[in-house]
């Protein structure tokens, strides 16, 4: 599919999903939201894609909502705004629920909805010059749509401060509160992301999918008998799966598992004819 606001580059089993509106600091509008949703479905269905990196072209990752889009929203009635918000929320949910590991590669700035994109990814690496802000209250709005993901990423106490003050904070502060997991100098950001990807491809694709589902199922759930039974079923299913059997066999036989061999074959440069 041809996109106008994003780009997808796939190599060695990794898809880099680029926000590609650098002229407006990768601010999103209804078109970008729809294209991101479509691209996520495309990447979900592609068995050759092992992981997805979300990145931004130009000087910043994402400055939030496009001003022209915001103006149109201000002219909409309640029902039109509700449907518009549902589309953005559905896209964030698709990113968060993607069965493949996701990494946000953040530079320059991540403001408002841009922070939602970062938080909806499984992990995030940012360059040291990046600034963050949940700026909605300064516009008389509330960060409702992004709140489930940003709250989970930074914690309630930090969210109370940054949601209510709308102040900008540094990459170092984002790292301190756990919103990002890796902090790198700008020239080392890609190497940092690649190091994470190198660890990811050691794991099995199916195991990644069920483990992401496991995290969602367990988070915030008390360890009662229902949880114990659920976990027993999950590990028994994994042990009996083709991947699980292959993983144990390869460990005992001291060899690389099949998925790692496949990843290495994909990474080999193709010979020129």
Image (cartoon, rainbow, N blue to C red):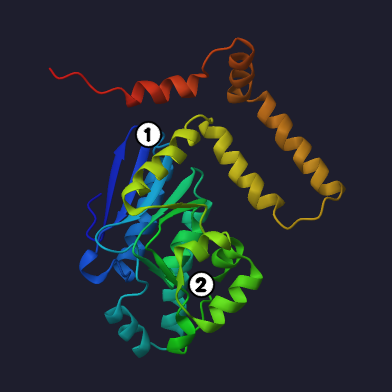
* Mark 2 and mark 1 residues within 8 Å of each other at the beta carbon: no
Left or right: 100 with respect to 62? Answer: right
**In the displayed structure, would residue 155 be above or below residue 248?**
below
Quarter holding the C terminus is top left
Q: Position of residue 220 (x, y in %)?
A: 73, 58
Q: Residue at x 30, y 22 (%)?
A: 268
Which label sits on residue 42?
none
Q: Position of residue 169 (x, y in %)?
A: 47, 72
**In the displayed structure, would residue 189 be above or below residue 254?**
below
Query: 9 or 191, which is in the foreground?
Result: 191
Which label sits on residue 145?
2
- Mark 2, Cα crowd under 10 Å, few <14 / some 14-19 / many 20+, is some
Q: Residue at x 58, y 63 (%)?
A: 177
Q: Residue at x 40, y 49 (%)?
A: 41
Left or right: 165 with respect to 223? Answer: left
Q: Position of residue 153 (x, y in %)?
A: 57, 61
Q: Quadrant of residue 214?
A: top right
Residue 241 makes an appearance in the image: yes
Q: Position of residue 212 (x, y in %)?
A: 59, 45
Residue identifier under label 1: 13
Query: 182 or 78, which is in the foreground?
Result: 182
Q: Quadrant of residue 51?
A: top left
Q: Residue at x 31, y 70 (%)?
A: 27
């Amino acid at each position: 599919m041809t996109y106008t606001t994003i780009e997808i580059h796939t190599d060695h089993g990794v898809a880099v999903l680029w926000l590609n509106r650098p002229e407006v600091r990768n601010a999103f509008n209804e078109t970008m939201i729809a294209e991101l949703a479509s691209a996520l479905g495309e990447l979900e269905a592609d068995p050759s894609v092992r992981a997805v990196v979300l990145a931004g072209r130009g000087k910043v990752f994402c400055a939030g909502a496009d001003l022209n889009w915001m103006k149109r929203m201000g002219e909409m009635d309640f029902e039109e705004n509700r449907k518009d918000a549902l589309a953005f929320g559905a896209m964030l949910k698709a990113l968060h629920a993607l069965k493949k590991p996701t990494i946000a590669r953040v530079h320059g700035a991540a403001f408002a909805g841009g922070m939602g994109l970062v938080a909806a990814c499984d992990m995030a690496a940012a360059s040291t010059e990046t600034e963050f802000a949940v700026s909605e209250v300064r516009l008389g709005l509330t960060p409702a749509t992004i709140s489930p993901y940003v709250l989970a990423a930074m914690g309630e106490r930090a969210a109370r401060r940054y949601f209510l003050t709308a102040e900008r904070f540094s990459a170092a502060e984002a790292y301190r509160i756990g919103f990002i997991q890796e902090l790198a100098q700008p020239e080392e950001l890609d190497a940092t992301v690649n190091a994470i990807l190198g660890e990811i491809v050691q794991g099995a694709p199916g195991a990644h999918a069920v483990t992401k589902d496991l995290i969602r199922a367990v988070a915030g759930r008390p360890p009662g008998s229902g949880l114990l039974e659920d976990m027993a079923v999950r590990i028994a299913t994994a042990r009996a799966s083709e991947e699980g059997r292959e993983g144990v066999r390869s460990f005992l036989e001291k060899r690389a598992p099949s998925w790692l061999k496949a990843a290495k074959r994909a990474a080999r440069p193709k010979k020129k004819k």
